Image (cartoon, coloured by chain):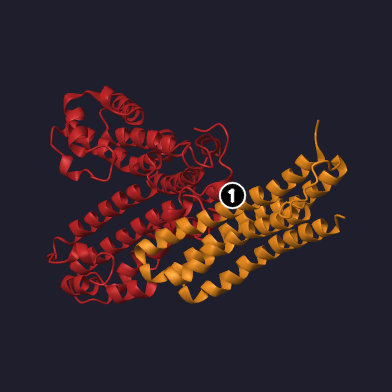
């Protein structure tokens, strides 16, 4: 990384990309549009209602059971488009890394179960699934990039030293991912976003562990490192119940979330909303890569919302219940 | 030995050079944003053009101030005073600085305001003219720099 920080006022590398993004932001689905889509009767009607959106080209001639695949194709195209647009390999590598970690977790669990889980992998990761599958099958982990090699080593170690528990493998890989994402040097915005994400994930994890009465057993493994509220600070707080959480989070941006501590689904929704509002806070930046990254993550959330609508409508779930799950 | 004449020429060069840099950086910022917007919405050319062009004026102010300084130095009439004293030369050098320095800084910042306007044009085309007014506010200081340089050159005997 450059020894000197780029002079912010001259950081115009992404100005072209920003222009494109601003023009595309107009096409983001609004709350009203989501409500219109929600009122569709059946998946066929939903598909035809989406023909004039960004997703129209992916949903053309698609059957009701293929819509999810079409949305995934739109997500792949989104990443590929932005990669071409910002032309910054390092930033894209960080943004794609979460899918690499997901894939390595899936493949390692597949290896443990002696099954081929490669169809459960995401093609958005920076390493092709076929290459990753081959590496895991042949156990040639030295061919992996440093961040994944460390994840594999720690994951396997956690699995074997904890009675062959695949959950520990997941915890270990997630920890390496959190460490990597919160310490990357490519973009302070990405670091800030993921620190925020780690804090929210830890808060939800603590509440779940307390609910399951397994906080003391799993707190060392389940919490992610790298957040604004460090793992050590949380451990030192000696949390015994959800009330003692308020002491820890008092005065932080997360304290308002504790209002929903009795409902995991509402807490999940509110924490996602907090993340989205953080992303939207850079909407007025005239320069820098932040609005481009924010657009990618907001669009990813939009695709997730559409997936919820598709699955909900396909399974006959009520409009209100689906709407409750949407992060708008 | 430093000649007053060379200091005066340095003043002329500073006016053109600094204001020109401000304009070229200032124009490239909204130009790139406009290219991005036009790749998605080609019909926005008219609305983005005025915002792209605005930061170019600093360069012109610097050039006009330099022309005025050169006329004062007798460059066009063949009456150049090569034996000017250091104090006389310094007057020209200092007179070139307001238009040059203010042009450099205001050009870059006007470019940033214009780039925001170009981005706004993509989302709310009807609001574009409001941002033009904001960009013109930055222009005011470039004009003040130019007028100051003009008066300073004029005051040189």
Q: Is residue B85 left or right of residue A282?
A: right
Q: What residue is shown at x 64% (from left), y 48% (from top)? A: B17
> Which chain: orange?
B
- Give the x, y percent position of residue A217: 40, 35
Q: Is residue A103 depicted above or below A200 in this figure?
A: above
Chain that is coloured red in the picture: A
Q: Secondary structure at mark 1?
A: helix
Q: Is residue A99 left or right of residue A208?
A: left
Q: Is residue A66 left or right of residue B107?
A: left
Marked residue chain, label 1: A
Can the viewer see residue A114 in this picture? yes
Q: Which quarter of the figure is the C terminus of chain A placed in? A: bottom left
Question: What residue is disc 1 on?
Answer: A9
Nearer the observer, B144 or A260: B144
In the rendered image, residue A301, in percent from the top left (x then y), is placed at: 35, 58
Q: Position of residue A54 (x, y in %)?
A: 28, 65
Up the image or down, B156 lies above or below A88; here it is below
Provide residue A55's location: percent of width, then percent of height: 25, 64
- Is residue A219 in view from this perspective? no
């Amino acid at each position: 990384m450059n020894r000197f920080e780029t002079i912010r006022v001259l950081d115009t590398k992404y100005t072209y990309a920003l222009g494109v993004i601003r023009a595309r932001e107009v096409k983001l689905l609004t709350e009203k549009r989501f409500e219109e889509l929600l009122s569709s009767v059946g998946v066929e009607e939903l598909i035809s209602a989406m023909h004039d959106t960004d997703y129209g080209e992916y949903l053309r001639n698609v059957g009701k059971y293929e819509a999810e695949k079409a949305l995934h194709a739109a997500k792949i195209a989104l990443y590929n488009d932005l990669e071409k647009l910002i032309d910054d390999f390092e930033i894209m590598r960080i943004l794609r890394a979460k899918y690499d970690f997901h894939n390595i977790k899936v493949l390692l669990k597949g290896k443990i179960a002696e099954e081929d889980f490669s169809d459960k992998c995401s093609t958005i990761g920076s390493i092709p699934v076929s290459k990753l599958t081959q590496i895991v099958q042949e156990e040639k982990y030295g061919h992996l990039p440093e961040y994944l090699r460390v994840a594999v080593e720690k994951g396997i170690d956690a699995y074997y030293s904890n009675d062959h528990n695949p959950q520990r493998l997941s915890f270990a890989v997630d920890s390496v991912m959190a460490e990597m994402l919160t310490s990357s040097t490519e973009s302070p915005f990405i670091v800030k976003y993921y620190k925020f994400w780690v804090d929210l994930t830890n808060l939800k994890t603590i509440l779940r562990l307390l609910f399951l009465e397994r906080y003391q057993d799993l707190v060392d493994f389940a919490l992610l490192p790298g957040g604004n509220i460090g793992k050590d600070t949380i451990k030192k707080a000696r949390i015994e119940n959800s009330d003692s959480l308020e002491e820890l989070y008092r005065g932080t941006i997360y304290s308002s979330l504790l209002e929903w501590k009795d409902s995991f689904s509402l807490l999940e929704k509110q924490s996602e909303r907090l993340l989205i509002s953080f992303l939207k806070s850079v909407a007025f930046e005239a320069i820098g890569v932040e609005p481009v990254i924010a657009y990618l993550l907001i669009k990813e959330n939009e695709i997730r919302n559409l997936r919820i609508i598709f699955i909900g409508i396909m399974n006959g779930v009520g409009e209100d219940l689906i709407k409750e799950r949407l992060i708008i | 030995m430093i000649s007053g004449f060379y200091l005066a020429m340095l003043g002329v060069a500073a006016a053109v050079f600094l204001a020109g840099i401000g304009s070229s950086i200032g124009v490239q910022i909204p130009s790139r944003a406009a290219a991005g917007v036009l790749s998605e919405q080609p019909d926005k050319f008219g609305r983005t053009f005025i915002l792209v062009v605005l930061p170019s004026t600093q360069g012109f102010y610097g050039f006009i101030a330099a022309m005025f300084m050169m006329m004062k130095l007798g460059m066009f009439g063949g009456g150049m005073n090569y034996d000017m004293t250091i104090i006389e030369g310094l007057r020209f050098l200092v007179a070139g600085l307001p238009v040059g320095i203010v042009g450099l800084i205001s050009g870059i910042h006007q470019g940033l305001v214009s780039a925001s306007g170009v981005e706004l044009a993509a989302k709310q085309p009807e609001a574009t003219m409001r941002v033009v007014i904001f960009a013109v506010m930055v222009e005011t200081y470039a004009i003040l720099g130019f007028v100051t340089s003009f008066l300073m050159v004029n005051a040189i005997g």
